[in-house]
Amino acid sequence: GAVVSQHPSRVICKSGTSVKIECRSLDFQATTMFWYRQFPKQSLMLMATSNEGSKATYEQGVEKDKFLINHASLTLSTLTVTSAHPEDSSFYICSARSGLAGGVEQYFGPGTRLTVT
Amino acid sequence: LAKTTQPISMDSYEGQEVNITCSHNNIATNDYITWYQQFPSQGPRFIIQGYKTKVTNEVASLFIPADRKSSTLSLPRVSLSDTAVYYCLVGDGDGNNRLAFGKGNQVVVIP
């Protein structure tokens, strides 16, 4: 149980275009989903927290107009990187929290490798 | 978000028990302590979670002293496939459980 998927697993796009990444909780309802970014040899950096049906909360320094997050259902959150540039190339990882009482573990997706050329 | 501090790296021989320490001096009263394992180009994998004393599951044990300012993840009889980065995190206790990843501990298992 507690499986989180991401699609696509890797994507290459041209500078200036937009890319959408999907995150799905396959066997549980996720009241809260999180988006992280990880550069090579570095740790994960939390970008934003999204709750189903409400606007995402972005961490300091993360541009909300560039990284659009939509959490339209309890099993799906999307991250759209708008007007992507080479510096946005990174490994994007989502996680989901089931919201069940007694535990607060998050389950992570396999990640999406974005390369902007 | 509560910060954690871990050794940057450690080596261990195959078959040995590995103990990975973590400091979290600013842990809040309602924060849990969670450990994740990450292989290159993969998302982190949940290992174990605890609040106090000792927690054990099929893959690891987690030891938390009474003051909860540190914790130790114990991996029994490691194999080469346990080579990974291990992260210790504490929840920020606001209900959303935002997690701040530290640098993690690169564990290398040697044959």
Image (cartoon, rainbow, N blue to C red):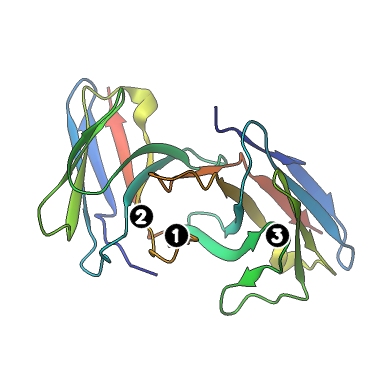
**Front-most of A49 and A99?**
A99
Query: x, y (%) of residue B44?
Result: 49, 42
Circles 2 and 1, Cβ within 8 Å, touching? The answer is: yes
The residue under label 2 is B89
Residue at x 27% of width, y 61% of height: B5
Query: x, y (%) of residue B62?
Result: 22, 39
Q: Earlier in the sequence, mark 2 or mark 1?
A: 2
- Please, what is the three-letter code of the amino acid marked with disc 3? Ser
Query: x, y (%) of residue B77?
Result: 21, 22
Q: Is residue B3 above or below residue B18?
A: below
Q: What chain does badge 3 belong to?
A: A
Circles 3 and 1, Cβ within 8 Å, touching? The answer is: no
Question: Does dot 1 land on a helix, a strand or a loop?
Answer: loop
Locate residue B111: give its quadrant: top left
Query: x, y (%) of residue B35?
Result: 34, 44
- Please, what is the three-letter code of the amino acid marked with disc 2? Leu
Question: CA gap, disc 3 to disc 1?
Answer: 23 Å
